[in-house]
Image (cartoon, helix red, strand yellow):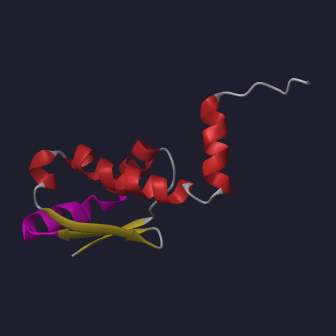
């Protein structure tokens, strides 16, 4: 029996996720979870439904004041969320 090159388990799992096209949905779920961590529990309490479609995060907010504030810092929020996930998952955020 011939031994093959030894690889770390993390690298093998990542290869498997890419092969099965599961990496993007997993990163999207990580990003949705990171929303509350990035904004904090007080601001996340005003968040309703969230979903990602075509690299755009759609967020329903119950506070018009918070919506205005987040719209001004949208670019920074996109960068921060993508950095938290470690991949470029979204390119835009739409607040409703």
Q: Is residue 1 above or below residue 47?
A: above
> Is residue 62 in the magenta section?
yes
The reply to whether the magenta stretch includes residue 48 is: no
Q: Residue at x 85, y 27 (%)?
A: 4
6 over 65 or under it: above or below: above
Based on the displayed image, in which of its 4 quarters is residue 48 positioned? bottom left
Residue at position x 33%, y 56% in the image? 32
Image x and y of residue 52, in percent: 39, 68
Residues drawn in magenta: 61-75
Residue 29 in picture, x, y percent from top left: 39, 55
Magenta segment's dominant SS is helix
Question: In what quadrant of the picture does the C terminus appear?
Answer: bottom left
* Furthest-bottom residue in this view: 96
> In the rendered view of the protein, which quadrant contains the N terminus?
top right
**In the figure, residue 84 lies in which quadrant?**
top left
| Residue 75 visible in the displayed image | yes
Q: Can residue 57 be seen in the rendering of this structure?
A: no
Left or right: residue 76 compared with residue 70: right
């Amino acid at each position: 029996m011939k031994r093959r090159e030894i690889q770390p388990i993390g690298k093998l799992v990542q290869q498997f996720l890419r092969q099965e096209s599961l990496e993007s949905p997993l990163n999207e779920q990580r990003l949705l979870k990171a929303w509350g961590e990035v904004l904090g529990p007080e601001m996340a309490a005003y968040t309703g439904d969230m979903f990602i479609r075509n690299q755009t995060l759609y967020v329903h907010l119950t506070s018009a004041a918070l919506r205005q504030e987040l719209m001004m810092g949208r670019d920074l929020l996109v960068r921060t969320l993508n950095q938290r996930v470690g991949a470029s998952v979204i390119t835009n955020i739409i607040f409703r």
